[in-house]
Image (cartoon, grey):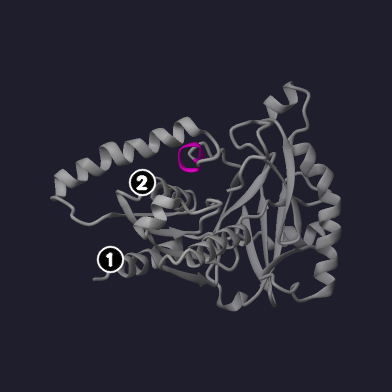
Amino acid sequence: MRARPGCDRLAVSTYEEAGEEIPNGDPSVTDAERAAAGRETLAERFAALLPGNRSRAAAQYEAGGLPDGQDMARVWRPRDEAELRARLTEPPLAMWTEADVLHLLWQGQAAEVQLYGGVQPRLWPVAGTDDLWEVSLRIRRLDEAVISLVVASRLADLRAQEYLPGHNRRRFDAHLRFVTDEVIPWADGRFGPVTTPWVAAGFSNGAVWAVTAAQRRPDLIGAVAALSAGVVPQRISGAACSAGVRHYLAAGTLEPGFRRSTGRWAERLRKAGLECRHEEWIGGHDQVWWEQQLPVALGWLLRA
């Protein structure tokens, strides 16, 4: 999850990932609101960036391989419409691989189509059609990767306001108070007195919440399992450092932003002398991997 650009709710910015320039904005704001205010919309920025993105992706396709330090890159080449439609033997979705390139084709009417699951690029419209959308990704060690894929229209991530500290302070603080003041006392009474600190665990937005909650309430939360955290604190709080909060952190090789953020947090913890285990898997932002990693994380954090 990308943080909103600055404090201007209507602003549109651009970031780069896997060789693609991607428009970004506050997820709580719609393009209709931006347009009504006479501001640039995300759709307009996407259309302006698409020709350049295709050009770079075409060059990457012809070059072969992957840039140093990257495990995934977007590639593209002009497609024949009849060739693509022939791939749709079980509409509306077709997937196939060519060497180290994963191709996905979707058929349908939509203003915007996004991949969710292990890899999460936006699909590009197929030129000359009004119902075909495509994405091609060159992936390092594709033959070893486990990737879940879901195609959907873009989803509004309103839940982020309660899980990411930078989006809506009032709602984030209310969520944290609900857990610390109501959920933990209820669990303590329901399952018996807990004599050791609690473990906060989560993935994606939940991982961000777990990390942040332990920074703010290390008197209650003494360990964190954070999988694929996309936004992490810039510094470790004095209270968390004094409490020695322990972390199990993990992310996939095919989720660049989440991988970077998770790795940076592991580095900060180690520099502060805090115990941390940092792992990676050959895959992306994926429920399959989170389900595998969570028992390992809890086993390590709860070891005697």
Q: Camera-side residue: 153 or 156?
A: 156
Q: Position of residue 36 (x, y in %)?
A: 73, 21
Magenta-colored span: 160-164
Q: Where is residue 13 in the image (x, y as percent from the top left)?
A: 74, 42
Give the answer, above or below, for where 30 lies relative to 264. above
Is 121 contained in the magenta span?
no
The overriding secondary structure of the stretch rendered in magenta is: helix
Q: Residue at x 84, y 72 (%)?
A: 62
Horizontally, residue 226 falls left or right of residue 200, namely: right
Is 163 contained in the magenta span?
yes
Label 2 amino acid?
Arg
- In the structure shown, which secondary structural element does the residue marked by tag 2 occupy? loop
Horizontally, residue 235 falls left or right of residue 59, namely: left
Q: How far is disc 1 from disc 2 in space, using C-alphas?
A: 19 Å
Horizontally, residue 250 falls left or right of residue 190, namely: right
Label 1 amino acid?
Leu
Work out whether residue 284 can be spotted: yes
Q: Position of residue 173 (x, y in %)?
A: 42, 35
Crowd rating for badge 2 (residues with CA inside 10 Å; few <14, some 14–19, many 20+): some
Work out whether residue 79 can be spotted: no
Residue 66, labelled with which disc? Answer: none
Q: Residue beneath label 1, please?
A: 302
Circles 1, 2 touching at the beta carbon (< 8 Å): no
- In the structure shown, which secondary structural element does the residue marked by tag 1 occupy? loop
Residue 217, labelled with which disc? Answer: 2
